Image (cartoon, rainbow, N blue to C red):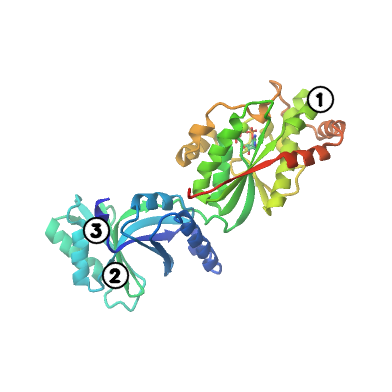
Amino acid sequence: MSTFSDKSNRLIILHHSEIALKKGNRSYFENRLRWNIQRALSDVKGIHVRIDFGRFVLSVHKDCDIDLVIDRLRQVIGLASIRLAFTGDPNPERLQEQVFELVRDKKFDSFCVATNRVDKQFPFTSTQVNQIVGARIHQALGARVDLKNAELVIKIDIVNKRVYYSVDIFPGERGLPIGSTGKVVSMLSSGIDSPVSSFRMMKRGCRTIFVHFHSYPFTEKTSLHNALELAKILNTYQNDSKIYFVPLADIQREIILAAPAKLRVVLYRRMMFRLTELVARREGARAIVTGESLGQVASQTLENIAAISEVVSMPVLRPLIGMEKEEIIEVARRIGTYDISIEPYDDCCSYLVPARPETNARLDEVHAAEEKMGDWASLIEKVLQETTVEKIQFPPR
Ligand code: ATP
Ligand code: MG
């Protein structure tokens, strides 16, 4: 990273995304984000974070691995941009030289200087600073000034009597800081959709607990392994996750014995929802998240969604309900879950499922089938006792 080769005096400036909209609660969101930034970098020594007029300013020790720090910050939800910066001299003539030194070896035909003067006591206006700094670069390097489409954008921030200048900018993940809007429990299969639906809620500020259902020992352990790997990837965006592994096999056996084959999927899923709600209550979560998308598979018709949601009193959030598969895949690829999701696995929902499952489950039939199962409530209790939890830490230590 050439512009950062002078390691003394290095800074990183972070702008947050939507927090600015939350006027009354601004400090609440800011503190949450600050905590998340510190957590994401907690294994990196020599970083100090402070808040300076609505932006985070990180001072970075010369021995820090800056690429690692940037990679970590790019996954912190709530940041709009990440800029490598230096402290500049408040005297524009000297600042002019500092900026020139930073860009003189770069190749660019057009540039602009964008000064943001938060400190109105500063004796020069932002336009004056732009002109003074820009003139030096134009004269010495011949590059033309382009305010709209510059190849190189030089940012200068004047905040609280301090001056920062930078040219390297990385996009942040945006969204609301994890934990700022509450906690949810997300049903995580090892398919393509549910990692994306989990991620969507994470971006809305939800701390997300994962629940995975499996039919082991009736099926292999692949789905558990894949779900854990997916949770680990998602964890890089939220740090310190938890995944519950719920054994569904005993319940499935009872369903298979008691109910018509075509109702199996709906009945499996009603039990999954009941169990998820119990986990959510134990965790103090306020909603259940699924990766359902209307019409995608047999269990995702409006009728079946109704027959499944009926069993829980907690809100069920379905962030993908109106999305197309291609759009979902695009997100999955970007966040890095796609390759694991397409690995083959035994799905507990496809365990002993007929080729033509019911797409229009009638509630009276569903209720009758559950009646026939007898004391399923004790079975649920037993399953919860056999449920295991795995904690995932990030950053790794
Ligand atoms: P996905 O790609 O997320 O597996 P899907 O298109 O295969 O979804 P279904 O199998 O009908 O659809 O599942 C719908 C939703 O139910 C999933 O998105 C997920 O939230 C939840 N779900 C399905 N299977 C499991 C499982 N084994 N463990 C936890 N949740 C599951
Ligand atoms: Mg699935």
Three-letter amino acid code of the residue under disc 1: Leu
Residue assigned mark 2: 126
- How far apart are the alpha carbons under marks 3 and 1? 71 Å
- The location of residue 147, given as percent across then percent down, is 27, 58
Q: Residues within 10 Å of mark 3 (few under 14, many from 20)?
A: few
Three-letter amino acid code of the residue under disc 2: Ser
Nearer the observer: mark 1 or 2; the answer is 1
- The location of residue 232, given as percent across then percent down, is 53, 42
- The location of residue 291, given as percent across then percent down, is 61, 39
Residue situated furthest top in the rendering: 355
Q: Quadrant of ligand 2?
A: top right
Q: Residues within 10 Å of mark 2 (few under 14, many from 20)?
A: many
- Please tell me whether mark 3 sits on a helix, a strand or a loop: loop
- Residue at (22, 62) in percent of width and height: 99
Q: Earlier in the sequence, mark 1 or mark 2?
A: 2
Q: Is residue 118 left or right of residue 269?
A: left
Residue assigned mark 3: 6
Q: Earlier in the sequence, mark 3 or mark 2?
A: 3
Instruction: Confirm whether residue 191 shows in the render.
Output: no
Which quadrant of the view contains residue 348? top right
- Please tell me whether mark 1 sits on a helix, a strand or a loop: helix
- Residue at (45, 40) in percent of width and height: 334
- Residue at (38, 52) in percent of width and height: 70
Q: Nearer the viewer, residue 278 or 169?
A: 278
Disc number placed over residue 257 in the picture, else none: 1
Three-letter amino acid code of the residue under disc 3: Asp
- The location of residue 123, given as percent across then percent down, is 27, 78
